[in-house]
Amino acid sequence: MISKWIARFAQTGMLAGLLLAASPAHAQYIGGDLNLDLDQDRSAQFLAGDVTLRGRVGGDISGLAGNVDITADIGGSVQLAAGDIVIRGTVGRDVSIAGANISILADVSGSADLAGADIRVGGRVGRDLAAGGALIAIDESGSIGGNMDLAGSEIRMSGTAQGRLKGRARTVIIEGTVAGDVELHAENVEIMPGAQIAGQLRVRGPNAPVIADGAQIIGEMTYEEAPFSEQRRARSHAGPRVSDFGPPVWAFGTAMGIAAFVLGLLACLISPRAVSGIADHFRARPWASGLLGLVLAAFLPILLVAVFVFLAITVIGIPLGIILLFAFPFIMVLAYAFGAVVLGDLIFNRSGDGIGLGMRVLSLFLVLAVVGALGVVPVLGFIIGSIVFFIGLGAWTLALFNRNPRIVAAEHNGGAAI
């Protein structure tokens, strides 16, 4: 009865997962160096070394990489973390970037939130610009449609801004046009010839601003002598947060699923009878398998540390302890694979009379794929993945300590046992 209920629940979960996987919202790219020429309406996510992207992406772009070079028409937003980042083309929404050298040469309809070492804006930002780094430069071709909040070691404003400019840096040089007020906290401020400030200029720092002949300041100019410190207060323009990126989550889930499938496949090939025994033990004791797996998952890390310390004390056992530490992750992934095996056996072998190698491998793949697809739902994916792991760990443990097939057969014929 319990096995039938679990089978029905698993079948429902597989159906939901297949429907979810059949209509993915993102195209995902993983590799070393990616050279992408895209023309798609979906969003794109990547995890790679160096990425070169050309073409059109109708949705969002997000990813982690060593270096990123984008020349594309992007309908959504851009969220990136990389070393050197260059963006050309158009961006329909906001840009949020963290990197070393950042160049925004695109036409951005929304806001830009940048964090890096050298930041260069040579394109158009339709709304606000927030940037933090060592050198922040707004080129002559750069245009900001809203306000600017900048913090760095040196700020050089050579473009145009329709809103206000609020900056904090050791050196600030303005030679462009600012339609709003300018408020600066800096050690050195230079207003160059040709600069235009339509609003007020307010400067705080140890040195009075240097205003060159030919600079135009329409509003009032005020200066307040105050010490300057390199220590900066917390800023809102810290670039994208780690939680903003899909790739680390889905990449981990994909790697986990692939590793589980490979280990499960090897187990099925090397010892098919042992794998069948694990499935039989779960079919005979479903509740005991899950509860035992939960208890073991809670105490195994403590037991692992205790055993490692004991082996380290003996000195001779140090190599064995190191091997145990390296083997532990593989054991956990293999337990997850066994959980997928027993669920696949429960769904595709409802009679319990045995299942061939091909069908067992296929069921393993389908269960792992469905659990991975359900992983896009944060809480649900975690719960289902944990249940699969607990079931596999518990059933594996029962099979290790009860190798008598007649006991398993008796329990199976007599119904599920606790």
Image: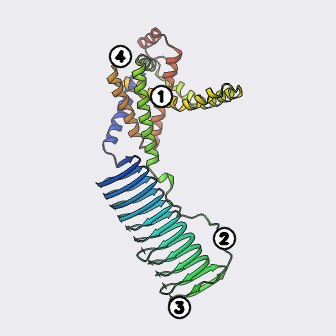
Q: Which mark is residue 334?
A: 1
How crowded pointer 1 is (Cα within 10 Å; few <14, some 14-19, many 20+) is rated as: many
Tag 2 near tag 3, CB within 8 Å: no
Residue type pointed to by label 1: Leu
Tag 2 near tag 1, CB within 8 Å: no
Q: Which residue bears the numbered disc 3?
A: 213
Tag 3 near tag 1, CB within 8 Å: no
- Kindly report the distance in space between the C-alpha atoms of the residues bearing marks 4 and 2: 74 Å
Tag 4 near tag 2, CB within 8 Å: no
- Kindly report the distance in space between the C-alpha atoms of the residues bearing marks 2 and 3: 29 Å
Q: Which residue bears the numbered disc 2?
A: 229
Which x, y percent locates residue 317? 66, 25
Q: Which mark is residue 179?
A: none
In this view of the protein, can residue 273 be seen by the observer? yes
Figure label count: 4
Tag 4 near tag 3, CB within 8 Å: no
Front-most of 204 and 123?
Answer: 123
Which x, y percent locates residue 364? 38, 28
Q: Which residue bears the numbered disc 4?
A: 354
Q: Is residue 352 above or below residue 212?
A: above
Residue type pointed to by label 3: Asp
Which of the two labelled residues, at mark 2 and mark 3, occupies the earlier sequence position? 3
Farthest residue, direction right = 313
Which of the two labelled residues, at mark 4 and mark 2, occupies the earlier sequence position? 2
Which x, y percent locates residue 409? 43, 11
- Kindly report the distance in space between the C-alpha atoms of the residues bearing marks 1 and 4: 21 Å
Farthest residue, direction bottom = 213
Label 1 vs label 4, nearer the camera = 1
Q: Secondary structure at mark 1?
A: helix
Residue type pointed to by label 2: Ser
- Kindly report the distance in space between the C-alpha atoms of the residues bearing marks 3 and 1: 74 Å
